[in-house]
């Protein structure tokens, strides 16, 4: 099998160097190029046709969000993985809506970055658990606008409801499958039905909808987070 071809886009040379070391440490991946701003990232992607682009969001000349939109429009088979310092809703949601397949914070472990590259290359979405938590906390002061029983949408099945609640705890599909003793394809199929029922397109929007409609219990989540930090 051919190695996964990776393009690294970040305005900090030290970050590019560190990411290159991480990626090159995996025999199933290779770095085909680097870019120090959004303009160069788009140009390099067009020339090199990478499988995955590791994209910083804050870069000179053209930001990572705009570069992501241009790359995914130009190269639909190329996956963009945002790797940045920002974990707030105002950064995460626009990046994913702009075409990014995943979103990681820069302090992620090297193994998590490599796993995310493999996941997005395979057509799956990835998001750091910390970002999931930050999204929930950023929405905690917004009043719930309903509940599964009062929403105009088709109600969730008990299994779908359980999956959404576990997403709210920051679990991946594999972790949810283990928790519920189901296969990962079953989790994905149920999550797809949730997206259809709620008319959303990705995992982040599922989470935001769940918080705003009272499906995810923010108080319970905060209590778990605080207990885990002691």
Image: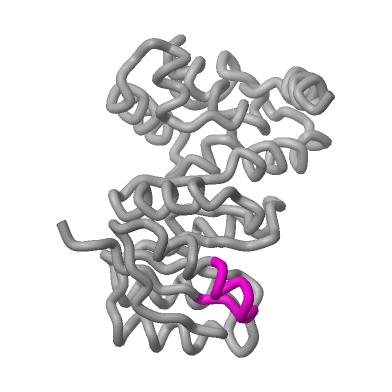
Camera-nearest residue between 163 and 129: 129
Say if residue 72 shows up in the picture. Answer: no
Image position of 32 with respect to 182: above or below:
below
Q: Position of residue 10 (x, y in %)?
A: 57, 76
* For residue 139, side relative to residue 108 (left or right): right
* Residue depicted at x 15% and y 56%: 1
Q: Position of residue 116 (x, y in %)?
A: 44, 49
Image position of 37 with respect to 58: above or below:
below
Image position of 199 with respect to 68: above or below:
above
* For residue 76, side relative to residue 65 (left or right): left
* For residue 54, side relative to residue 143 (left or right): left
Q: Position of residue 67 (x, y in %)?
A: 49, 77
Q: Is residue 14 magenta?
A: yes
* Residue depicted at x 58% and y 48%: 109
Q: Position of residue 11 (x, y in %)?
A: 62, 81
On the image, which quarter does residue 227 sit in? top right
On the image, which quarter does residue 205 sit in? top right
* Residue depicted at x 46% and y 22%: 176
On the image, which quarter does residue 124 sit in? top left
Identify the main secondary structure in magenta.
helix
Colouring method of the image: one colour
Camera-nearest residue between 5 and 111: 111
Tell me which segment is drawn in magenta: 9-18
* Residue depicted at x 75% and y 20%: 224
């Amino acid at each position: 099998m051919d190695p996964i071809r990776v393009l690294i886009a970040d305005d900090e040379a030290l970050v590019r160097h560190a990411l290159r070391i991480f990626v090159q440490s995996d025999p199933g991946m290779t770095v085909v190029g680097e870019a120090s701003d959004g303009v160069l990232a788009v140009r390099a992607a067009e020339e090199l046709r990478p499988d995955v682009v590791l994209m910083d969001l804050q870069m000179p000349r053209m930001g990572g969000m705009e570069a992501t939109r241009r790359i995914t429009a130009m190269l639909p088979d190329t996956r963009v993985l945002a790797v940045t310092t920002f974990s707030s809703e105002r950064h995460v949601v626009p990046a994913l809506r702009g075409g990014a397949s995943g979103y990681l914070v820069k302090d992620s472990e090297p193994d998590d970055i490599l796993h995310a590259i493999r996941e997005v290359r395979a057509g799956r979405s990835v998001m750091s658990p910390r970002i999931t938590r930050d999204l929930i906390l950023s929405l905690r002061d917004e009043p719930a606008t309903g509940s599964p029983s009062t929403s105009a949408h088709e109600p969730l099945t008990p299994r779908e409801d359980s999956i959404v609640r576990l997403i709210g705890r920051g679990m991946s599909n594999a972790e949810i499958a283990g928790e519920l003793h189901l296969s990962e394809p079953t989790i994905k199929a149920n999550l797809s039905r949730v997206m259809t029922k709620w008319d959303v397109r990705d995992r982040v929007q599922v989470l935001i909808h769940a918080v705003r409609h009272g499906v995810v219990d923010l108080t319970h989540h905060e209590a778990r987070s605080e207990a885990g930090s002691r």
